[in-house]
Amino acid sequence: MNSLNAKGMQEFHDRIVEFGNDPELWVGIITGAGQKAFCAGADIKGLLSFHTEHPGELKEKPATPMRGLKLWKPLIAAINGVALGGGLEIALACDIRIASENACFGTPEVTLGLIPGWGGSQRLSRMLPWCKAAEILFMGRPINAEEAYRIGLVNKVVPPGQVMSTAMEWAEIICQTGPLAVRAAKELMIRGSSMTLEEGLELERTLQLSLMGTEDYAEGIRAFAEKRKPIYKGR
Amino acid sequence: MPLNRAEVYGANVKKPVIAAINGCCLAGGFLLALYSDIGVAFDNAYFNAYFGIPEVKRGVPPTFGFTAKTVEYYPSGIALELLLLGKTISAEQAYRFGFVNKVVRKNSLISTAEAYAEKINQLSSLVVQNIKSGFYVTCNPPRQIIALEDAIAKIVRHSKDYRGGTVAFRERRKPVWNIEKSCHQLLSMKSRIGLLYLLSIVHRL
């Protein structure tokens, strides 16, 4: 079921950081191993027992896109099955979500007397209508892919075998665009969401100025004038 | 560790960090000291250029919260001298502004730092860590400022001045600055002007 323990979390962190630092990688896709599950959340026995034994301890946790890690490169979640608890929260921290018809989405934490701990309480309530977020968060009962699509939790639902290929297709389209512009757009979405409109507009103006100095922008307008496809380098 | 984050320079460490500054403390080194909680330095009469941010001389913008942290510790006139001119200041001056807690003789530097550590060690680590976390929640620069500093640094980083400055440094010659054409249309943008712009925002917020 691809549940995460402390070691898995560290590896997840390491891979994401590698992705973030590799100039050749422009778009990330996160998917689950196997056919059944995207990720069923934290390994309850392994990860949660630690916290029971060490209550209130401020332990350094590896930063992830769910919390603490600033990653402006776009992430796509290829949700190939169950996405529960932390698994759903990983998907929520991605920018685009492609789901398999057999996927399900939920935060069962409350059934254990806990709340989601990787941003679920914040992202669900900001992404969804209040009542749908409350339904998922309070009842701990998962919703299916069709319902997730209906409420705008995922971009697309595809047959089980096609999740990864669809995610690749979407990633390919993003890779045709200017990577620095895409990153600036994501940065604005994330940073802007905790700013006033005025501050967000100031940030937008500043990032726009920075893009105007890039080689990619020069290439973009050159290609447009020459009526050909631009070749972007991320510089 | 991702190398593009303030965490690399010690931001957001939960446990107390003491900087025993045993020599010149410039650029990234200065940032390390800015992000530690207690600073002890030794006074070196021979080497007066102790603390500073010489980046501006190479066309490199301050980032990772550098601007906000400098403004937090130094009066604005001094902060501007550090940031805009790349000026350096002595350990004694840094002490005067409360940036280092103590200036000691060289041979007692480590023992002084250890004495601080020993005092903290007597306390409950849970309580100390929570107090530290509360302290920085209160006085960390607002995230809008960090975001804008990053964005302004990007303007400079995509400029000819940045490329020219770093190349000149490598070739050990004086850099030649030019005003970027594309930016110039909107905002007369030299790296220094970028800095002024940022500082004006820091003061406005």
Image (cartoon, rainbow, N blue to C red):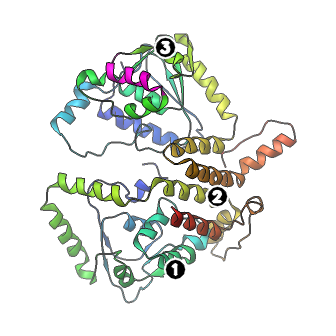
Q: Name the residue located 54 percent from the left edge and 76 percent from the top edge.
A: B86
Q: Name the residue located 86 percent from the left edge and 37 percent from the top edge.
A: A227
Q: Name the residue located 26 percent from the left edge and 28 percent from the top edge.
A: A114
Q: CA distance from mark 2 to mark 3?
A: 43 Å
**Amino acid identity at mark 3:** Glu
Contact (CB < 8 A) between labels 2 and 3? no
Q: CA distance from mark 1 to mark 3?
A: 61 Å
Q: CA distance from mark 1 to mark 2?
A: 23 Å
Residue A16 position within the rendered picture, expressed as x and y whole percent measured from the top left: 46, 38
**Amino acid identity at mark 1:** Lys
For disc 3, the marked residue is: A147
**Amino acid identity at mark 2:** Ile
Q: Of discs 2 and 3, which sits in the foreground?
A: 3
What are the residue bounds of the magenta stretch?
A: A128-141
Residue A84 appears in the picture as rendered: no
Subunit of mark 1?
A: B
Same chain for marks 1 and 3? Answer: no
Subunit of mark 2?
A: B
* Dot 3 alpha-carbon crowd within 10 angstroms: few under 14, some 14 to 19, many 20 or more: few
Residue B172 position within the rendered picture, expressed as x and y whole percent measured from the top left: 62, 75
Residue B144 appears in the picture as rendered: yes
Q: How many numbered marks have been drawn onto this rendered protein structure? A: 3
Residue B93 position within the rendered picture, expressed as x and y whole percent measured from the top left: 39, 83
